Structures are given as structure tokens and as C-alpha cells.
Amino acid sequence: MLLLRSARIPRHCTTLFSSSLSSSSFSTAPPPPHKKLSVTNTSSPNVHLCPKENLNVVFKPGAYGGQLMAQSLTAAINTAPESHTPSSLQCFFLGPTLISSDVYFTTSLIRESGKSFQTFRTVAQQLAPEENIEDLPSKPVNFESTVSFYKTLPQPDDYTAMSPHLNDSPLTSSDFQTSLSLSDVSASIKSGFIPRNLLYKMALKLTQSCTADMQLTIRLPSNPDLNTGKTAYFIGVPSTMQGDSLTSLKTLIPYVSDSMTQVLSACDALDPVWSGWPSKLTVWNYSINYHVNSSNNVSPSEAFVDDEGTRWFVIEYVFAGARNGIGNGFNHIWDLDGSLLSTSSFQVLASPPKE
């Protein structure tokens, strides 16, 4: 796929496709209490709960990894001082998190450097029906995250000091206009407009992987000439999951970022490096570094919001290689104005072949 790069997209370009653009300022207020991203307090200090009814289903019986990432970050934010904001997140998926049980997130401070930096560890565990919260220390850890926080700066960050390359979006507003939803791709194939090529194979895989309770919408660029090992796509989040604060945006990014689960399910259609690999791939180690501004009084980049209140991001995905059952990948998440929001790296494990 040809990735079109440009400098920051002028505002008049995005308003052609949107009736409303977000213009509120970021603050460090807590994230909105959306059930997909939030957790609730328990009787035990620093232990938060996600009821099983709120868990997303991706590949039964496992929960959606991006939701665990977002909820563990929320638990850490609720535990850290209000003056600190998350700067990076590292996650390890150590075992299956079942959708049949509640998930408990236990957070602890593991490192403090002066007055500016703190690091918290959060683990996710599940209990059997007859067990209670006092039994958590003896339960296996399904998921673990480490979140680094730093004290919010009193003055705005200087965006002009950033490399100009960080402001180059991989796709433009015009690309969004010509992109296709998964249902559009299906209809275009039936009409003969799109042949059964790599774009079709990717859309087919994504359709099989996406579930309604994830509340994410994926659109693919209509250009069928996808580059080997590298692609970019649009992902939309409904207005009910959006917040006005910087903190809520940082909570939303892990949820959006792990749409890689769906993209990885299509890798065998995109990249010959996957030929001969088992079809089941699992994200194991996921790290996110944030690039969004940390200050209280800084206006956000203008988010692209469509007529239905869906906020759109661009995810650029690069697969670096696969050896001995372990694959390495990278992605960037952008606003459609060209602002880089986060950089991620991840490792995937291929399930061993059946005997």
C-alpha cells in the first residue's frame, strides 16, 4: 500500500468530512467512567475490579487484551498522585483471562525517583466462585503491566522542538474519504468492484475477528496494493468512549492499540513471512510510549470526529520479522491532523504446531 505522507493537515481539509471537531482543552481530570475502560474500587486498598459482564470477547474464552491494558492503566492512574501523568506502559500477557470470571487489578508502587518519577506495577487475577478477595495473593497472575508516571510540567511542551518527521501522518483526510469499512469491502467484492486480492483477504480476517462489544470500527484504505509487512488503517472509537482529558486519551490509546489482535489475524494474507506459521497468534509483550502533551493548559490536536460522533485515529503497522515462533512488530497511532500520539512495540507468539 502506498503510504501518503504530508505535513500537518490543514483544518479546512478535515472539516470537509466532519460536522464537528473537538476543540476542548485537555486537563488531568480522571477518565470518564466508561465500563470498557474503567474499574471500580473494592474493599481492599489499591485493588480494583472489572466485572465479568463488562469484559470484551475476542477469541473465546479469552478477553480482549486492549481492554486489560486500558483497565490496568486506569487502576494505576487511580493509585498514583493526581499531579503525575503516565508516560509509558509495558504489558505482559502471562495467561488466559477468561470472560467467565471477574478480573481484579492490584497496583503497587515499585520505584520512585525524586519528586518527578514514579513507577507502578499492576497485576490482573481471577477468583473461583467460592473464593474471596483475600485469596488473591495465592492466585496466578494472568496479566501484568508496569506504568511509568512523571509529574505534570507547569508549562506547555514545545511542539516546535520536535522532529518534523513526527508530524507526518501516514494517511491523509482524503485517504479517509476513500477508505472502506469492512462491510463496504464485502459489498464491493460481491459487486465485482474489488477483486479477491490481499485487501479482500485482510478484510475477511478482520471481519471474523472483530466483535460488536469491542466498540471499534476499522476502515481500510481502498488501495489494494498493500506493502509486504507494512500497512496502515483507520480505527474509530464511538463518542461514548471519548473523554476530554489528557488522561482519558492516554487510557483510550491502549484499548485502540491492541486492535493489532485483529490485524495480526490477517498477517498471513499480508506478509509471506507468515507462510507456514500456525494461524493462532498471541500478543505477549506490549509496550507503549506516549507522545501526547502532558501540560494542563495545552489545547489538544484537532480530533477527526465524523457525523456520528466517532473519533478516528490512524494506526501504522510495521512487522519487523519472525524467527523461531516469535514475531516483532511496531505501530504508531496518529490523529488525522498529523499529531503522533504514541509509539508501540510488541512481540507475538505463534501457537506450536499440533503433533
Image (cartoon, grey):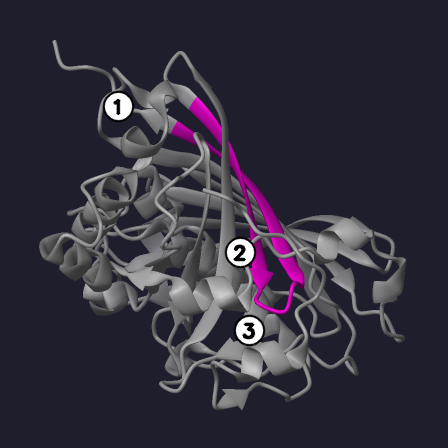
Residue 252 spot, x, y in % from top left = 49, 66
Task: Please give the name of the residue rendered at 37% of the width and 27% of the height, measured from the top-left corner.
Answer: 271
Q: Which residue is mark 1?
A: 351
Q: Which residue is mark 3?
A: 248
Mark in front: 2 vs 1: 1
Q: CA distance from mark 2 to mark 1?
A: 30 Å
Picture quadrant of residue 133 = bottom left
Q: CA distance from mark 3 to mark 1?
A: 34 Å
Above or below, 272 relative to 20: above
Q: Label 2 amino acid?
A: Thr
Q: Which residue is mark 2?
A: 107
Task: Please give the name of the residue rendered at 86% of the width and 60% of the height, measured from the top-left corner.
Answer: 115
Q: Residues within 10 Å of mark 3 (few under 14, many from 20)?
A: many
Q: Residues within 10 Å of mark 2 (few under 14, many from 20)?
A: many
Of helix, strand and loop, which one carries label 3? helix
Within the magenta stretch, is there residue 331? yes
Q: Label 1 amino acid?
A: Ser
Q: Is residue 29 visible?
A: no
Q: Are marks 2 and 1 in contact (CB under 8 Å)?
A: no
Q: Point out the stretch of residues depicted in magenta.
A: 327-348
Q: CA distance from mark 2 to mark 3?
A: 19 Å
| Labels 2 and 3: the sequence-earlier one | 2
